[in-house]
Amino acid sequence: MNVLEIAVLPGDGIGKEVMPEALEVLRCIAQIHGGIRFDFVEFPWNCEYYCETGKMMPDDGLDTLAGFNGIFLGAVGDPRLVPDHISLWGLLLKIRKGFRQTINLRPAKQLKGVASPLVNPKNFDLIVVRENSEGEYSEIGGRIHQGEDEVAIQNAVFTRKGSEAAMRYAFELAQKRSGHVTSATKSNGIYHTMPFWDQIFKEVQTDYPEVKTSSYHIDALAAFFVSRPQLFDVVVASNLFGDILTDLGGAIMGSIGIAPSININLDGKYPSMFEPVHGSAPDIYGKGIANPVGQIWTAKMMLDYFGEEELGTALLQVIEDVMESGIRTADVGGTASTQEVGDAIRERLHRLN
């Protein structure tokens, strides 16, 4: 039996509403399948915890999480309580960096039952490999002076090791998909880091002669995500570019509320973390209308990651069948509640048994 010990961090806002639905889906799968078991341990680390303790997580939080097979995260942030830069750097980014989760993987595809805002989405099915540990999100920089002389400096840090790891992951993933990798760049405007990125991409592609490649400046690539998303298979991007492109990927799917992701530790020394792309949406928290699909699709990616691809494929099919049947939350054109969508997915899973 595949026994998985999973640390659960519902987090803030709608994370606390969608997480229970996803956990019940995974319990349902374990009950039906019999060959997998989940041992969930929940931690109350969020903005309310910060207000009580002055910290987003305990000092030994990473040591605690390191003993789990994986981390299942809901959403982090409530600017009404804690500034975003404190909540994110104190929990989400602390985990990503502390556990060397250097790859962020985010798919976007035309789902059955969800109307894309694109007039003709042409059945797009792409995945973005985002470098997740450095780039534009480095901590190097600072502020000096005050008043009209104040200056803020933010340094982007690109290492050969980090860039190449993301690119090799993208090429190897493309070999399992449609065999095409697109690089997101901006070497016509960013003088040092993007030509460096382009150089490494050209070097890496020589090791994968069977994989087709293309490279687009980020502004054009963002436009092509809207006008011709069917062109793309695997897209590899820096930390910032990947972050922006994947929010756009959620938008062209029909809602960022359905977009999943995984933060991967490549060497297996630390656990990887599974989280939906959406935020905590405090404006709709407590109304019971949050879309649980992003969290449940993230659960599908967790199943895939732990070698249960058949179960993951079945779960995504069930998600699409439920939405195609009309059981959808308001953000994707329906009237169902968060729990009603979760109930429908679980009921349809039982039918597969």
Image: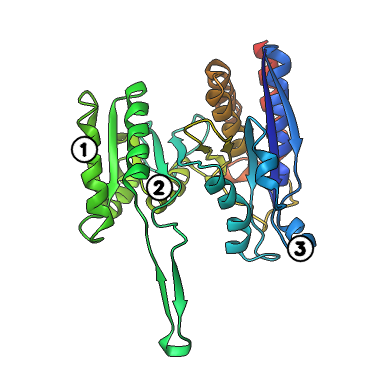
Give percent across and percent down for residue 277.
54, 45
Mark closer to the observer (1, 3): 1
Tell me the crowding category of disc 3: few under 14, some 14 to 19, or many 20 or more residues within 10 angstroms, Cα based.
few
Q: Which residue is label 3 attached to?
A: 51
Q: Residues within 10 Å of mark 2 (few under 14, many from 20)?
A: many
Instruction: Name the residue tied to disc 1.
Output: 203
Placement of 305 over or under 146, stated as above or below: above
Judge whether residue 70 can be spotted in this image: yes
Indicate the quadrant containing the C terminus: top left, top right, bottom left or bottom right: top right
Secondary structure category for the residue under label 2:
helix
Q: From the top left corner, tell me how far across and down residue 164 is, in percent.
A: 32, 40
**Amino acid identity at mark 3:** Cys
| Amino acid identity at mark 2 | Gly
- Mark 1: give few (<14), some (14-19) or many (20+) Cα within 10 Å: few
Query: Which of marks 2 and 3 precedes in the sequence?
Result: 3
Tell which residue pokes out farthest to the right in this image.
52
Front-most of 268 and 324?
268
Question: Where residue 2 sits: x, y (%)?
Answer: 65, 16
Let me know if residue 233 appears in the view. Answer: no
Residue beneath the point at 45% across and 46% down: 132
* Residue 344 at x, y percent in the picture: 69, 27
Which secondary structure, mark 3? helix
Relative to 93, residue 85 above or below: below
| Quadrant of the image occupied by residue 323 | top right
Q: Which mark is residue 242?
A: 2
- What separation in Å lies between label 3 and label 2 (alpha carbons)? 32 Å
Q: Nearer the viewer, mark 1 or mark 2?
A: 1
**From the image, which quarter does the N terminus lie in?**
top right
- Amino acid type, residue under disc 1 in the picture: Glu
Q: Examine the image and state in which quarter residue 150 appears.
A: bottom left
